[in-house]
């Protein structure tokens, strides 16, 4: 697609997606909780850090490859689980998984996906399955069994959604699953014929992995918030993580832990990785960002588990800053959904190609040729240059134990 070739960065891809999507769908993709302060800070926080540039280093062979969740990855980036991908393009999760497989990065399938566990397994992608704890533990166990039977290498438990966030954009648009064609949104749908035609052709829109257990919530016109509040278990505790660890023999990941103490508790429960995440700013507004906490988390847990920074990543430099601050890699959600909305599988492939090119180029410009060589010495807080040495405003160098 010619339009994809004109997208030189993720912001360009977001603009293409914005033109492709009707307003209610675009707001569902872009929106955050309440005043969207945390949503905005997820991006802004990266501007508070600067990268070191080491010169006269042989960078003729830059290798951005690493391992994430037990999978080889062509770069320190993986795809976060995102719900209902068919909202953004009729090809949905399967297109994302195929693009991830081609790019050599891991892909996460959401419990709230519109494509089944089995269908994603057939794509051959290196895959992990994201799980919520349902009140019905029978449903939870059934999902675990299906993931194991279909060779998902890791299980990712999301722990920050016991209560749905207050996403006011969705309240204003009346966003439900699937979208309801109300009079207020009719004009927006009518002016986006490509999306509308794809939606009309796609008669199978449903939460493919839970529909047999809880019914087709789309046909009932249930809102996302109502569904979350009705089905997710508010009583879940760390004992449930211990139970899950006993039920799952593969790698176990916690997504949504942010506080260093919670991360240490996760390690004690036997997890293999933590996705440090505020759910893309869609849950608790005015919460801090993964980047705010990364150095303290790494200092607390040392090298006991992998840390994946999830939220606000839009540039290769963002990925490298996160690694310097203590992450082993990053995960992205909205960026690949921009690609999906703009051009299906080809759009996702374009997003991943942009990230890889930026990461490799920026590593070379930093004077680093391997991900393992990036450390706290490669990043400084901007306040280092805004305050006199020894003054109250001078920054403290983040600490990261060498791997």
Image: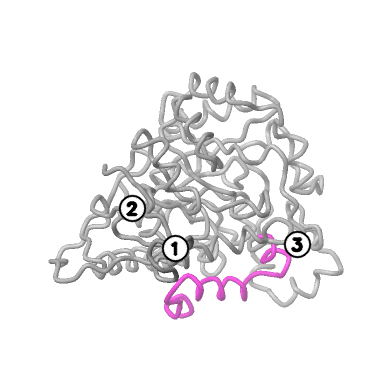
Considering only vertical position in the picture, is 266 above or below 3? above
Q: CA distance from mark 3 to mark 1?
A: 43 Å
Residue 344 location in percent, x, y?
A: 51, 64
The mark found on residue 391 in the picture is 1
Which residue is more in the foreground, 353 or 321?
Answer: 321
Mark 2 Cα-neighbour bin, 10 Å: few <14, some 14–19, many ≥20 = many
Q: Residue at x 38, y 65 (%)?
A: 389
Q: Residue at x 40, y 61 (%)?
A: 390
Residue, disc 2: 104
Mark 1 Cα-neighbour bin, 10 Å: few <14, some 14–19, many ≥20 = few
Taking the image as shown, residue 37 lies to the left or right of residue 339, namely right
The first of marks 2 and 3 along the sequence is: 2
Considering only vertical position in the picture, is 109 above or below 11? above
Q: Contact (CB < 8 A) between labels 2 and 3?
A: no
Q: CA distance from mark 2 to mark 1?
A: 47 Å
- Residue 142 lies in the magenta-colored region: no
Range shown magenta? 1-28
Q: Residue at x 14, y 71 (%)?
A: 56
Which residue is more in the foreground, 159 or 149?
Answer: 159
Element carrying mark 3: helix
Viewer-side label of 2, 1: 1
Residue 292 location in percent, x, y?
A: 50, 53
| Quadrant location, the C terminus | top left
**Number of callouts in the render?**
3
Residue 37 location in percent, x, y?
A: 66, 61
- Residue 7 lies in the magenta-colored region: yes
The mark found on residue 169 in the picture is 3
Element carrying mark 2: loop
The first of marks 3 and 1 along the sequence is: 3
Considering only vertical position in the picture, is 241 above or below 316? above
Viewer-side label of 3, 1: 1
């Amino acid at each position: 697609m010619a339009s994809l070739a004109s997208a030189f960065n993720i912001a360009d891809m977001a603009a293409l997606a914005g033109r492709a999507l009707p307003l209610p769908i675009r707001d569902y993709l872009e929106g955050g909780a309440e005043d969207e302060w945390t949503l905005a800070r997820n991006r802004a926080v990266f501007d508070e850090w600067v990268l070191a540039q080491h010169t006269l280093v042989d960078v003729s062979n830059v290798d951005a490859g690493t391992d994430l969740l037990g999978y080889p990855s062509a770069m320190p980036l993986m795809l976060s689980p995102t719900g209902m991908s068919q909202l953004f393009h009729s090809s949905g999760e399967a297109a994302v998984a195929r693009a991830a497989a081609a790019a050599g990065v891991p892909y996460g399938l959401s419990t709230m996906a519109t494509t089944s566990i089995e269908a994603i397994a057939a794509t051959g992608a290196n895959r992990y399955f994201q799980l919520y704890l349902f009140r019905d533990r029978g449903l939870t166990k059934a999902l675990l069994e299906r993931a194991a039977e279909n060779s998902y290498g890791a299980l990712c438990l999301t722990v920050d959604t016991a209560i749905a966030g207050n996403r006011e954009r969705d309240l204003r648009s009346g966003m439900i699953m699937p979208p309801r064609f109300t009079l207020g949104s009719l004009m927006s749908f009518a002016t986006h014929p490509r999306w509308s035609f794809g939606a009309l052709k796609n008669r199978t829109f449903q939460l493919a992995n839970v529909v047999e257990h809880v019914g087709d919530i789309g046909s009932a016109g249930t809102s996302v918030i109502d569904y979350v509040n009705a089905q997710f278990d508010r009583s879940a505790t760390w004992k449930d993580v211990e139970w899950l660890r006993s039920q799952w023999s593969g790698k176990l990941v916690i997504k949504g832990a942010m506080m260093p103490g919670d991360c240490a508790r996760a390690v004690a429960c036997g997890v293999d990785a933590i996705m440090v995440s505020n759910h893309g700013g869609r849950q608790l507004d005015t919460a801090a960002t993964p980047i705010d906490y990364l150095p303290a988390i790494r200092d607390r847990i040392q090298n006991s588990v992998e840390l994946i920074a999830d939220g606000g990543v839009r540039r290769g430099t963002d990925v490298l800053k996160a690694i310097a601050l203590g992450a082993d890699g990053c995960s992205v959600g909205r960026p690949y959904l921009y690609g999906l909305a703009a051009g299906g599988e080809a759009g996702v492939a374009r997003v991943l190609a942009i990230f890889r090119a930026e990461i490799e180029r920026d590593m070379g410009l930093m004077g680093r040729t391997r991900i393992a060589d990036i450390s706290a010495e490669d990043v400084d807080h901007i306040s280092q240059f805004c305050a006199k040495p020894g003054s109250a405003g001078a920054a403290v160098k983040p600490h990261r134990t060498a791997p």
